[in-house]
Amino acid sequence: MKPFEKLMIVDGYETSRMQTMDEMNKVFLRMISDIKKLERSKKLTIKHDEMLKRSVEWLKNHQHPDGYWGYESVADTGLVFLALITYGIRDEIWSIKGKYEGGLLKASKWLKDVLNVDNWENNLWDTSICFQALYRYEIRDDWIFRVLEWIKRTCEERAEKLPLHHLAQAIQALLDAGLEEDARKVCEIIIYRMMSHMLDKDNYMDPYIVGQVLDALVRAGYTPGTEVISVCESNLRNFLKGARNKGISEATFQDVMMAFTGLASLLGGNDDELMNSILAEVFKSPERYKKDGFWYHDAKKTAFALIGISKLKEVRKIDEFPYRIYKVITNYQKELEELLTNLKEEYETRLKTLKQGYLWISISFLSIIISLLLVLVLTINNPVSQLIIGGILFPVFLSSATKTYLLFKGK
């Protein structure tokens, strides 16, 4: 045992240590209780499910006979395609306005026809959205892998300059294809850019951007303890609180849904008061949600809403969706660290006080030995006797001096 280790049980330290252990046990019990509560995350109501089904049917019925959505829009078509895939639509063939044949197969053929060799419109966001939709539709032809290579190459060559939400969707595409290492590299670039330019809020704190970034980072495995995740969550919560207070307009709807999507990915279930209130506003009818199933009579906005709400529609089991556990543990970790820090500071203070006391005792003992040696030397004239007594006392003196030196040095 090293010098002074035994002092740990002296002067009430053991009592403090036991009290700290009791407090830590209580913290662990509270943490376990909160983790167990996560098993009971709420799902959407049956009423919400019926409204979402109407939205899916509305999108299907508003497909153009040639296969696209919007005004021959790649972005709208890719986004609606992705939303329908998310809600389980695959090989179904449906009637468009009772006249034409529609379906995702027709949409995939249209997207292939307008493909620019290996990308859509030289736009990383559009290309990544379309790739996600088509890859989840299980298209595995050569041309889809050319698209994947273009996404990967574009990220490698231009990630420092491209908009962050473009990179966020590229991460989703890379993860779909199983390229986790490449996705992680893009994540690190996003994190560096965001954390290096926090003051440039117009470019880096736009909720439309941050929501997509948070969604991608969560899927890539970044936990709530990561600084960038905390920053994104705080930013999106502030935005959604403001939107709730001011009211959600058609102009801000996409921003709201992207912020909602990011937070929903992080939370993994709709048992959050802010998220529940935003969800209620999103479904508010007839102001936003129309009885036929669309939002603002717009396919793109309706697709955004469906994708965002899908993050809450199926609340995953804890072992499949661990981010909420990480959040709980992160909160309690700070409390445990504070308890241990206080215990360490108390130990160091007590140890310092005890060392000072032992130092003065050692100095006093050393002074007594020196005085005794002087008395013996002065009162005994026989050199042999002086030698014998000195030989006996000198090791004691040397040992005391060594201990005093160690105490003085704080060892």
Image (cartoon, rainbow, N blue to C red):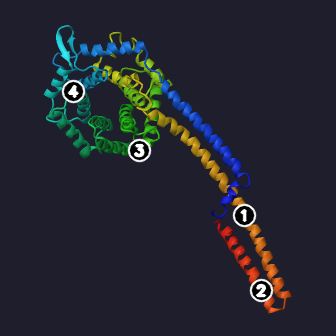
Q: Which mark is residue 195?
A: 3
Q: Amino acid at mark 4?
A: Val
- Left or right for 222, reference 140: right
* Mark found first going from the N terminus, 4 or 2: 4
Residue denoted by label 4? 74
In the picture provided, is 155 more to the left or to the right than 23?
left
Mark number, residue 299: none
The residue closer to the viewer here, 119 or 335, is: 335
- The type of residue carrying mark 3 is Met
Q: Report how far apart the C-alphas of labels 3 and 2 lie in the structure.
A: 75 Å
What mark, if any, has residue 388 been given in the picture?
A: 2
| Alpha carbon separation for disc pair 2 and 1 | 34 Å
How many other residues sit within 10 Å of disc 1, few (<14), some (14-19) or many (≥20)? Answer: some
Amino acid marked by disc 1: Gln
The quarter of the picture where residue 142 lies is: top left
Which of the image's four quarters has the C terminus?
A: bottom right
Whichever of callouts 2 and 1 sits on the residue coming sooner in the sequence is 1
